[in-house]
Image (tube, rainbow, N blue to C red):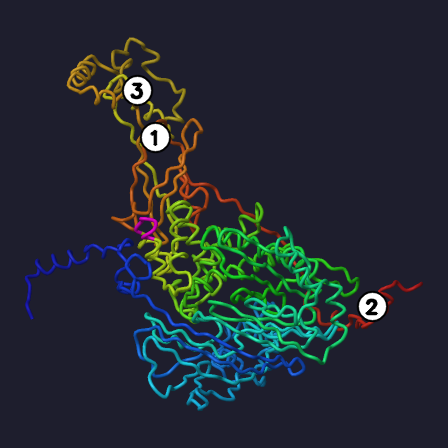
């Protein structure tokens, strides 16, 4: 041990006590977090010349057993190994295994808290009837895939099922550039979507016609993705992290009751076999119509509901270059359609819905599909598929290539039969259709890994949804997007960064949908501006259509195409839970001295006159003074004081002016006002400053300062503001465009925050057991209750 003299030791302690804090560099580059660029994924964010991805083609024959609510099917999968690797086994997703009684989804579920579960004071806090029913029935429902056989070249293949994943062991390695063909036979029971939830299932219409409506998805064993960043993406399906799939061609034959109508991914190959001549003629009219054309009318659908056919029909569909396939089937379907053709898009927008969806669905669904394609084409890529479909059924909102399942319906009064819908239902329907049809672009075409990163499809899609809703009508009632709408979440404690795996997200909707949406709005409106942002965002969509981007590809493309270093933005918004909270701490005014004594001494006198009068001087006002009684005591100093301009002052000024260059004299004459403004970054997330400056004349100007103003100090800065006239006020973020979580500290001088306090009457006798016991028991017959309340005759 080395011993230091006492004085030296004290000095060392003093130095360490005042050591500077480590510099928190918010502008540190993301190289340490992002993967190293390669010839597969370049530093610019574009696919490299060595980019590759796998492919899987499917031929499937399936039968819907309506009576038993089951699917039986057999199919052939052709798997193309485009990777540079030899594969000894293949992984497939068995997503229906989510519904096996012992699935990880069921066994890993937890309750929010003991208190909320057991002592909830409302439906939002406690356990609901339908939630309890779902728990009970999920323990007994015999769901999940039943794999009957897997063969190649007529020989059985060895396979192992690991919960929601299945490994097929190949008899020999699948070399690069080759393909493998194998067949699978399977069946499964369809879940009741209203009871067991999920992203597909059936809905039973018990109150009316006793019919079912089937929305069928994740209905066949699907190839898991294999790609350069992750290898096999075989994370278990727990319910939140959605799907990561390969593109391919689909040849699908669906056998259903002959009175059913099918909505499906792909194009119908045999309309003559399954549609009437009238329906085919209506479809031809819809192709060039300016508004939706009804293909199956409500009257025709209601007639079909009244009986059940024992015969079957087989509908044949083909879809090219899609990553999945879904369909819906029911005799209850009303069907309308409208063609849309522009630039690279030539599609049929179509809606399928039961009578319970009208009048809401007939009025808005197909119109919303067309609007979505118009707007998304503008900001990303031309819609490439032949159909775009919205189906009303038990699933509230879920997307698949060319088809989406959407939930909102009107409400029918049980007593009067009157059908109405709320404002929330109307805009909820329009919004969910825009969102789910929009998913065709992200991630059905720009094919991100949903199992890993929910925000890459939900966040980007919600952002374009926001833009599309803005174009629907003025003052569209949006629930997410505006920066001011995210502040409660941004200042909450129970959150994780956006860059968190899908199954580990807290506050799922706010994290994966709302916060990325807001971040991109801030990036578009405040950081980059619309022109730079829109060019870069469209470049991302164009680069990665029909390919699989990762977060780094998005971040790098946005920087590359906009010509802007945005590492600080991605780091703050996506990798931390920091919030925007900028405080205006103080302002000091500095005028440029004119050096003219007549001006400067008058200015100093004016400042002196602004000082408050002391209490003593206030109370002495009017008291008798000797010099007032004896004027002869007054002299030069009673008439002149510290602010009197002397000839010496003027001589010095004249001498100084003679030494100045013309430009220096002009600078003195400008009379600029200088203000040092102190800002604190309380929230931790660096942000551009948007300053509204109010001048003495009442004029207001906006000064926009880039986020780099924080590059030397991320906690406190001082900014110089120069004006032509005196400044009387300053507001940071006047339009609430940066998601500042505390606007009470954004103004100088501080503004009073208006609010309200509610007064309530004191309630007495609310726990009167005797009174409650004597309360008359109500009858099930309302007439009896009315009779009990009538006054008795005296």
Residue 602 marker: 3
- Magenta span covers which residues? 559-565
Which marked residue is nearer to the observer: mark 3 or mark 1? 1
Quarter in which the C terminus is drawn: bottom right
Residue 723 marker: 1
**Foreground of the two, 224 or 499:** 224
Task: State if disc 2 and disc 1 touch (CB < 8 Å).
Answer: no
**Foreground of the two, 712 or 74:** 74
Pointer 2: what residue?
Answer: 782
Residue 232: x, y in percent? Answer: 37, 76
Task: State if disc 2 and disc 3 touch (CB < 8 Å).
Answer: no
**Foreground of the two, 145 or 60:** 60
Residue 282, compared with residue 607, is above or below; it is below
Query: Secondary structure beneath disc 2?
Result: helix
Residue 313: x, y in percent? Answer: 66, 76
Query: Secondary structure beneath disc 3?
Result: helix
Residue 438: x, y in percent? Answer: 51, 59
Q: Describe residue 113's horizontal placement relative to residue 636 as left or right.
A: right
Which marked residue is nearer to the observer: mark 3 or mark 2? 2
Task: State if disc 1 and disc 3 touch (CB < 8 Å).
Answer: no
Measured in 3D between alpha carbons, the distance from the residue under mark 1 to the one under mark 2, in whole angstroms, is 75 Å
Which marked residue is nearer to the observer: mark 1 or mark 2? 1
Tell me which numbered mark, 3 or 2, is placed earlier along the sequence: 3
Q: How many marks?
A: 3
Q: Is residue 42 magenta?
A: no
Tell me which numbered mark, 1 or 2, is placed earlier along the sequence: 1
Query: Secondary structure beneath disc 1?
Result: strand
Q: Describe residue 478's horizontal placement relative to residue 511 as left or right.
A: right
Residue 136's image quarter?
bottom right
């Amino acid at each position: 041990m080395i011993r230091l003299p006492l004085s030296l030791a004290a000095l060392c302690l003093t130095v360490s006590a005042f050591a500077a804090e480590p510099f928190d560099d918010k502008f540190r580059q993301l190289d340490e977090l992002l993967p190293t660029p390669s010839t597969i994924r370049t530093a610019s964010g574009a696919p490299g010349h060595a980019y590759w991805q796998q492919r899987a083609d499917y031929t499937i024959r399936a039968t819907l057993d309506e009576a038993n609510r089951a699917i039986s099917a057999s199919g052939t999968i052709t798997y193309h190994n485009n990777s540079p690797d030899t594969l000894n086994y293949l992984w497939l997703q068995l997503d229906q295994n989510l519904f096996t009684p012992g699935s990880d989804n069921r066994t890993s579920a937890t309750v929010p808290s003991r208190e909320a579960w057991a002592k909830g004071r409302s439906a939002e806090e406690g356990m609901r009837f339908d939630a309890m029913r779902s728990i009970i029935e999920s323990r007994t429902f015999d769901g999940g895939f039943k794999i009957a056989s897997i063969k190649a070249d007529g020989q059985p293949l060895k396979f192992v099922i690991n919960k929601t994943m299945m490994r097929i062991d190949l008899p020999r390695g699948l070399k690069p550039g080759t393909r493998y063909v194998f067949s699978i036979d399977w069946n499964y029971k369809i879940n009741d979507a209203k009871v067991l939830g999920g992203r597909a299932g059936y809905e039973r219409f018990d109150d009316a016609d006793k019919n079912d409506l089937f929305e069928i998805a994740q209905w066949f064993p699907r190839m898991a993705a294999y790609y350069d960043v992750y290898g096999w993406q075989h994370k278990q399906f727990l319910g939140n992290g959605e799907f990561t799939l390969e593109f391919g061609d689909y040849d699908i034959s669906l056998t259903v009751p002959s009175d059913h109508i099918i909505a499906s991914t792909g194009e119908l190959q045999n309309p003559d076999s399954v549609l009437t001549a009238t329906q085919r003629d209506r479809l031809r009219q819809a192709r060039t119509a300016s508004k939706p054309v009804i293909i199956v009318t409500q009257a025709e659908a209601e007639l079909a509901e009244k009986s059940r056919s024992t015969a079957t029909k087989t509908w044949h569909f083909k879809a090219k270059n899609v990553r999945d396939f879904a369909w819906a089937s029911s005799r209850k379907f009303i069907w309308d359609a409208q063609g849309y053709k522009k630039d690279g898009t030539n599609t049929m927008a179509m809606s399928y819905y039961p009578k319970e969806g009208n009048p809401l669905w007939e009025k808005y669904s197909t119109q919303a599909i067309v609007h979505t394609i118009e707007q998304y084409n503008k900001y990303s890529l031309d819609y490439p598929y032949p159909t775009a479909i919205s189906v009303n059924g038990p699933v509230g909102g879920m997307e698949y290539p060319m088809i989406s399942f959407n939930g909102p319906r009107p409400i029918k009064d049980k007593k009067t039969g009157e059908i109405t819908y709320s404002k929330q239902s109307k805009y909820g329907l329009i919004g969910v259709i825009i969102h789910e049809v929009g998913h065709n672009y992200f991630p059905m075409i720009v094919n991100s890994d949903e199992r890993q990163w929910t925000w890459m499809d939900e966040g980007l899609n919600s952002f374009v949804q926001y833009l599309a809703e803005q174009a629907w009508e003025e003052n569209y009632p949006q629930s997410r997007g505006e920066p001011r709408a995210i502040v409660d979440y941004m200042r909450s404690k129970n959150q994780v960064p956006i860059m968190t795996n899908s199954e580990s997200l807290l506050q799922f909707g706010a994290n994966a949908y709302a916060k990325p949406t807001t971040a991109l709005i801030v990036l578009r409106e405040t950081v980059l501006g619309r022109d730079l942002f829109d060019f870069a965002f469209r470049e991302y969509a164009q680069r990665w259509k029909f390919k699989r981007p990762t977060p780094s590809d998005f971040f790098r493309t946005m920087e590359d195409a906009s010509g802007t270093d945005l590492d600080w933005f991605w780091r703050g918004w996506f990798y931390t839970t920091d919030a925007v909270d900028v405080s205006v701490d103080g302002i000091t005014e500095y005028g440029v001295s004119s050096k003219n004594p007549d001006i400067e001494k008058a200015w100093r006198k004016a400042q002196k006159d602004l000082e408050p009068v002391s209490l003593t001087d206030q109370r002495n006002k009017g008291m008798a003074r000797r010099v007032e009684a004896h004027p002869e005591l007054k002299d030069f100093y009673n008439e002149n004081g510290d602010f009197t301009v002397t000839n010496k002052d003027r001589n010095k000024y004249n001498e100084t002016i003679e030494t100045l260059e013309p430009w220096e004299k002009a600078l003195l004459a400008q009379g600029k006002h200088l203000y040092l403004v102190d800002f604190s970054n309380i929230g931790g997330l660096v942000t551009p400053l948007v300053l509204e400056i109010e001048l003495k004349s009442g004029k207001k100007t906006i000064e926009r300062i880039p986020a780099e103003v924080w590059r030397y100090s991320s906690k406190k800065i001082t900014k110089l503001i120069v004006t032509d006239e005196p400044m009387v006020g300053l507001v940071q973020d006047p339009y609430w465009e940066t998601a500042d979580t505390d606007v009470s500290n954004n103004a100088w001088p501080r503004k009073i925050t208006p609010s309200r306090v509610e007064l309530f009457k004191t309630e007495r006798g609310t726990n009167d057991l005797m009174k409650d016991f004597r309360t008359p028991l109500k009858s099930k017959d309302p007439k009896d209750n009315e009779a009990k309340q009538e006054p008795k005759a005296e």
